[in-house]
Image (tube, helix red, strand yellow):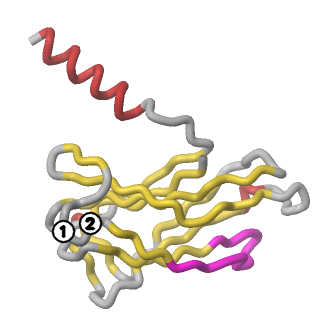
Amino acid sequence: MRRQWALVFLLFIFFNCDDDATYRQSQLLKENAWLITDTVRFAVPSIVEGASHPLYITIKHTDGYPYQNLWVKYSMVQNGKSITTQRVDMALANRESVWNGKRMGSTYTYKQLADTLLFAETAGNSSDLVLKFNHIMRPDTLQGIKAVGVVLD
């Protein structure tokens, strides 16, 4: 029993200490489904101004997700004004339908670079920055999507 707890502790440390991101957040989706009307929002706290940060999108999904890819639209809004809107094609599986990313049990976590954000000194307080994410797939409901996240390195 002691060995099992030690193994669990080591796995916890291994999976939670793999990087030192500036900002990392994720939001669970209700009933493991992403509705086309669901906008996932992240209010980014103050970040060192004058620095650039790679923006990664993370998706947690089950093997019940029926597609190889996921099209995501993200918008960056500051002080109520839209700064940029981008579309990202996330390859959750390869051509042989093998899931990309890390697997833990029946859940897969895929992380993909989407953009590099530059926080200029004149841009104002980055605490007013909001990142918004929507899926732009044809079906209104995407089953098997458990969470959407963002990482700024």
Q: SS for tag 2?
A: loop
Q: Position of residue 124 (x, y in %)?
A: 85, 60
Q: Residue at x 74, y 78 (%)?
A: 81
* Image point (62%, 55%), residue name: 54
* Secondary structure mainly formed by the magenta segment: strand
In the rendered structure, the answer to whether residue 144 lies left or right of residue 87 reads: left
Kind of residue at disc 2: Ala
Q: Give the image quarter of residue 6.
A: top left
> Is 4 drawn above or below residue 65 in the view shown?
above
59 to the left or right of 40? left
Could you tell me which residue is drawn at 21 percent across and 52 percent down?
107
**C-alpha gap between disc 2 and disc 1:** 5 Å
* Residue at mark 2: 93
Q: Give the answer, above or below, for where 26 lies relative to 139.
A: above
Q: Position of residue 135 (x, y in %)?
A: 40, 78
Are the two marked residues, 2 and 1, in contact with CB atoms closer than 8 angstroms?
yes
**Amino acid at circle 1:** Ser
Q: Which residues are magenta?
A: 76-87
Residue 86 covered by magenta stretch = yes
Q: Quadrant of the N terminus?
A: top left
Q: Which residue is mark 1?
A: 97
Q: Is residue 143 magenta?
A: no
Q: Residues within 10 Å of mark 2 (few under 14, many from 20)?
A: some
Q: Nearer the viewer, residue 30 or 44?
A: 44
Image position of 87 with respect to 115: above or below: below
In the picture as drawn, the residue positioned furthest to the bottom comes out as 138
Residue positioned 35% across, 28% down in the render: 14
Identify which residue, 22 or 111, lies in the foreground.
111
Location of residue 83 (image quadrant): bottom right
* Secondary structure category for the residue under label 1: loop
Where residue 143 sits: x, y (%)? 21, 73
Look at the picture and state if 15 lies above or below 85: above
